[in-house]
Amino acid sequence: WRKYLALSGHSWRDDAVWTKEHIPQVLTAWAREHDYAEKVENNISLSFNDRESFPDWMAGQTIEEVLSALNQEAPIFLRANTLKNSASTLARLLQDKGVLAEVMGDALKVVDRAAFKKATNENLFPAGLFEVQDLGSQQIAPMLQVKPHDRVLDACAGNGGKTLHLAQLMKNQGQITASDIAELKLRQIEVRCRDARVSIVRTRLAPIVDLVFDAVLLDVPCSGLGVIRRHPERKWQCTSGKIQELVKMQKELLELYKNTVRPGGALLYATCTFVADENHHQIKSFLEQNPGWSLEEEKSFTSGPRGWDCFYA
């Protein structure tokens, strides 16, 4: 919409108010570009933000290559459930069902999207055989370096994708507490664990403040701008004001859950965004205010040639 507004001769402001008068002008610009209407010569030069259709404030948060990649259709990545089978075995099973996939460690990249969607719609794969999970997201859980027999908390577990990954890394030995404020999500995790043959996960409503763990995963609520290929509306729903509200909530969660980590244990903070205030700046502030803590590892997974979404941990 921003691109075609610019092509119709209007300058952009992030606080622009759309009116019904804009709509025919924008649709006409679109039709001309796609040869549905007579082309009109113009000398309009589009900026990157106009051409790729990003709010100005957001475009200043990361490099142009990342934003361009986030306007492309997202690849489909799978994570093999190694408690049931290897990635290579899974690739052969997929091929038997007419789905080609490239093996990448424990992950697979689906080559034929249409065949995969058709097969999943027809329920050709047993439940719990694999998880659909972006390759960037698959890099998060291993950073916690969990071992069999650890006591682990997934504090903002959501639907449990990273919970299941942690259980897999622990070889289904030890104890994982999956917590969330939504009881429905916890019930979904329980079903997914049964399907995946995971027996070490117990669920509990958040917050948890009365237990201590060897390792804590804090995958906090965030702006989600690193996954806008899957949710493009977030580009326009998110504002710099909402970012500051999220930063405040993330800070509160860090302060709350730091007390659930045993001395010498590990806390892994993670987001699916590229906004520095939610990522590096948040951790820098935490470390300044908590001198007893130290930073072991910090990673940013950005979209681009690798094809994954944007994550920070």
Image (cartoon, rainbow, N blue to C red):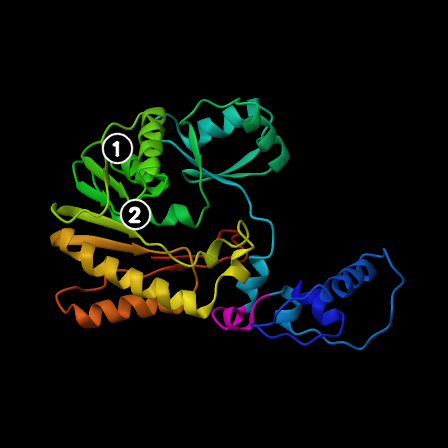
Q: Amino acid at mark 2?
A: Cys
- Magenta residue span: 54-63
The kind of secondary structure element at disc 2 is loop
Left of 56 or right of it: where is 133?
left
Q: CA distance from mark 2 to mark 1?
A: 22 Å
**Residue 157 screen position, x and y as percent:** 31, 43
- Type of amino acid at the residue the image marks with label 1: Lys
Q: Quadrant of the N terminus?
A: bottom right
Q: Is residue 273 visible?
A: yes
What residue sits 25% from the left and 71% below the top?
A: 285
Q: Which residue is mark 1?
A: 171
Residue picked out by circle 2: 156
Magenta stretch: includes residue 59: yes
Magenta highlight: main SS: loop
Farthest right residue?
A: 38
Disc 2 or disc 1, which is closer to the eye? 2
Within 10 angstroms of label 1, few (less than 14), some, or many (20 or more) residues? Answer: some
The image position of residue 241, as x and y in percent, is: 42, 69
Residue 217 left/right relative to 67:
left
Mark 2 vs 1: CB contact within 8 A? no
Label 1: state its secondary structure.
loop
Dot placed on the residue nearer the N-terminal end, 2 or 1: 2
Residue drawn where x is 30% and y is 65% of the image? 248
Q: Can residue 164 be seen here?
A: no
Tell me the crowding category of disc 2: few under 14, some 14 to 19, or many 20 or more residues within 10 angstroms, Cα based.
many
Q: Residue at x 37, y 39 (%)?
A: 159
Considering only vertical position in the picture, is 1 above or below 229?
A: below
